Every structure is written in structure tokens, then in C-alpha cells.
Amino acid sequence: MPKAKKDDAIELLKQDHREVEGLFKEFEQLEDDQDAAGQVIETACAELKIHDRIETEIFYPAVREAAGKEEIEDLLDEAEVEHDTVRELIQKLESMEPIDDKRQAHFTVLMEYVKHHVKEEEKEMFPQVKKLKALDLQALGAEMKERKTALMAEMGVEAAQESEDETA
């Protein structure tokens, strides 16, 4: 039974959140090492782009449909606007040269923005989503996991998390 819970949509999103938070901590410890920090920025941006796609393509639309006119609509609208801003910050970062003086400052702003977004999702949105009777979080999680695997392959991102999941 624990395996089933681990693969539901909310748990998959939380796993992504923890992974990105780990990259943020790593970045904060590497600020003086520009090469290593640059690699962390690239990895975090790739992870965030994949996460953005599974949330905005699959999770948010499914929640919106299941919620109907409930108060979760406002949270979804705000989350989608936050995703737009994160996408813009990532595009800016990806267009900058690694030696650009403001690249790390842009990434720091991205980190703060993402931390705020994660906190709102986990403290406000997810508890409401769990109450939606019309939403099958297991089926949604399976669809999201499949899409994430495809996006990772498309973007050439290694599946470090996948091998850990198999042994768990």
C-alpha cells in the first residue's frame, strides 16, 4: 500500500519539490564556484521546466475540471501566473552567458519565487485537492509519471530519481 500512495499525483509533485529544493541548497553553498553553480542552475532549470509541463498540462487541468466552481479556482489561477513568471525567469537565465554577473542574482530570484510557489501549493492547494472526490490521484499520478519520463528523454535529462524509486 505505501507504494500506491507514493505514486499519487500530489506525492510525485512533492518529490519534485524536494529535488529542486536540494538543488537550491547546493547552489547556495557553491556561489563562489561559478562553474559548479552554473551546472546546478542548468540542472534546476531543466527540472523546473519538466515539473512546469506536468503541472500545467496534466495536474492543473484535471484539478480544475474536478473542482468545478470551488474556491480552488483562485489558487489554480495564481499558480498558473506563477508558472508564467518562472518560465520567463528560466528563459532569461538560459539566454545569459555563464559569466554574466547577474546570472546568479536571477537564479536567486527564481529560487525565492519557486519556494513561495511550493509553499502555497503544499499548504493551501494540495490539502484542498485531496478532498476532491471526482479526482483519481493514482491515475493522475500514473499519467504524470509517464509524461515526466517522456519529457526527460526529450530533454536529455537523466532519471536519477527513477533508479531510487525502483529499489524503494
Image (spheres, grey):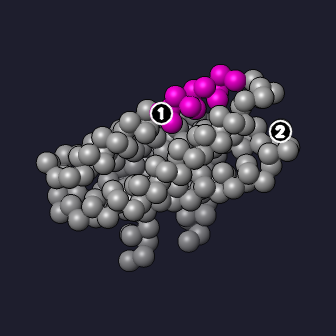
At 51% from the left edge and 41% from the top edge, which residue is drawn? 50
- Would you identify the image quadrant in which residue 78 lies? top left
Single out the residue that lies furthest toward the right.
33
In the displayed structure, does residue 78 sit left or right of residue 111? left
Which is nearer the eye, 2 or 41? Answer: 41
Assign a secondary structure to mark 1: helix
Q: Give whichever of 155, 52 is nearer the camera.
A: 52
Question: Residue at 65% of width from left, 38% of height from top?
Answer: 107
Q: Residue at x 14, y 48 (%)?
A: 68
Above or below: residue 6 compared with residue 9: below
Answer above or below: position of 80 versus 26: above
Q: Which residue is mark 1?
A: 85
**Residue annotated with mark 2:** 34
Is 167 situated above or below 102? Answer: below
Percent x, y for residue 77?
30, 40
Chain part drawn in magenta: 85-96
Q: Secondary structure at mark 2?
A: helix
Residue 65 lies in the magenta stretch:
no
Left or right of residue 15, residue 57 in this image? left
Which quadrant: the C terminus?
Answer: bottom right
Residue 104 in the image: state x and y as whole percent.
72, 37
Q: Specify the amino acid type for callout 2.
A: Gln
